[in-house]
Structure formats: C-alpha cells, structure tokens
Image (cartoon, grey):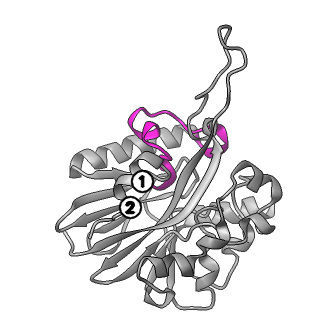
Amino acid sequence: MTDADVTVVPRGTIRMDRNFQQEAHTIARRSDPNPGLEFVESPIYNLVIDHPEGTILWDTGAHPEAGDGHWPAGLFDAYPVEDPREHDLDTDLERAGYGLGDIDCVVQTHLHMDHAGGLERFAGTDVPVYVHEEELKYAYMSATTDEGSAGYVLEDFHHDLEWRLVHRHRETPFEDLELLHLPGHTPGLLGTLLHLDDAGTLLFTGDLADVAANYRKEWPMGPGLIWNRQEWLESVRTAKEIERRHDAEVIYGHDHDQFEGIVEGWP
C-alpha cells in the first residue's frame, strides 16, 4: 500500500448513441418498429495521482479544438464534446489545483481522440509518457492508413514525446501502481491498479468498460468501440479476477452515474 492521493479532473462531456456504449441497447421489434434512439452524455475525466515517487497524470482528454477541425467533421458529429475550448488541459488542471509543471509523468490508457488530446502539451519535454507498445503501433497505423480505427487523430500523438513503452501484461513503474494490459477496446488498452493506504485498492478500467453494464453484465460495447470482441471479454474476466483477488473498487471509463460519486477523488 502507498500513501498517495488521487484527484479526479473533470474534462467535460462527450455524447454518443447509446448503442455505441451498449451493443443493441435499442432495437426495433414488431411491437415497437420505430423505437427512439438515445444520444447520451458521458463524462471525460483525467486523474492526478500524487504518488511518493512523482505526480502522475492519467490520460490527457480531448483536444480543445476538437470541434474546430482538429477532429474530422464526421467524428465530431458522432461523438461531440461539449465546449472543448473551455476544457483545455492547462485550465482543467488549474481548476484541480495543479499546473503542467507539476506533472512528472503521463499514463495514457490508450490513444483515442478523447483521451490523448492533451499530449501536445508535453512535446519537447522530458516528461515520460507511458503507453503500451501495441497501442502506439495501432494508433499510427489507424491514423495514417485506411486500416484500423477511425478513433485516432494523428495530431494528438505525433509529437516529440518521451515515450515509455509498456511491453508486458503487467508492469509496475511505481510502487503499488500496476499498469495492466487489457486489450479489446483497443489492442493496447491499459488499466491501472493502485493500492492506497487509506482507500484500499482501486482498479481503473479505462475504456475496457465505458459503463457498469459493460463490466458487471459483460454487455459488449458496440462494434465501433470494440477492436476484438473475444479479447475484450477475456480482459473483462481478467479484470474481475483482479478485483476479486484484491477486493478492489472498480472505476469505469465514462459512467455518468458512477462519476457523480467519485468526483471528489480519493484524498
């Protein structure tokens, strides 16, 4: 266990069709041939982990110009971010009591557009950026070819960054903080397991599970949000075993209901 504080940094909200978060959530049937679709709002958040070995920023949110051409128009139409200019990384960190200069390292759970948009603020610095090797390879392939996923924006991560590649399934870059390779949503998604003195063990799933139903009910996200369905299911079950073994509190990637209860963090 480590004496660390975890601050939740709200980074605005992102909206999408609920069928992206929960596959076939709304379907037509004879009794209801034209059901209404839901365009749901979900939180984007980062973490600042004040660890005895350094101050860690977990993810970097969406780019402030996401709606002004930084993201392709079709991507922003499907996944609009509310007021991204009001949620640039510097401003949101300041609201949480931190500055960019306080950050000793960055952990990128993955490199999708709503998670990697603040990386440019660390370009040309010696701040290490942890990312899984499979994620970095897939992100570049997706952003520069017609293959892969549309969820990567090259300008988010194509910078002079001090990459620290995670190669194994579990790595411990800091005492009592493990990075967990949980592929499925993307090839290189990283979860985070943190053992705290006072709050116990926290398991941050990242976008392995957008919402509780993805995890508790093993309800898959829609095809647009799953790179490999079988690997995703295996990762969910791996995370559940880790939860059981450590009696961990599980925190999801974009769960609106849960977010209201964690916004105060774990001081």
Q: At label 1, which amino acid type do we have?
A: Phe
Q: Which residues are magenta?
A: 205-228
Q: Answer above or below: position of 144 versus 99.
A: above
Check the picture and name the quadrant holding the C terminus: bottom left
The amino acid type, in three-letter code, at marker 2 is Val
Q: Indicate the quadrant where residue 98 lies.
A: bottom left
Q: Residue drawn at (44%, 36%), measured in percent from left and top?
A: 213
Q: Residue 227: in sight, yes or no?
A: no
Q: Which residue has dot 2 on it?
A: 263
- Going by the image, does 87 lie left or right of 267? right
Residue at image coords 34%, 50% = 250
Q: Residue 45, position in %: x, y?
A: 49, 63
Q: Is residue 192 among the parts visible in the rendering? A: yes
Nearer the observer, 99 or 228: 99
Mark 1 vs 2: CB contact within 8 A: yes
Residue at 41% x, 77% y is 56
Inter-mark Cα distance, 1 to 2: 6 Å
Task: Decide whether residue 213 is among the magenta residues.
Answer: yes
**Secondary-structure class at tag 2:** loop
**Residue 125 placement (x, y as % from top left):** 57, 91
**In the rendered view of the protein, which quadrant contains the N terminus?**
bottom left
Q: Residue furthest top?
A: 30
Relative depth, front residue between 96 and 220? 96
Residue 259 - label? 1
Label 1, secondary structure: give it: helix
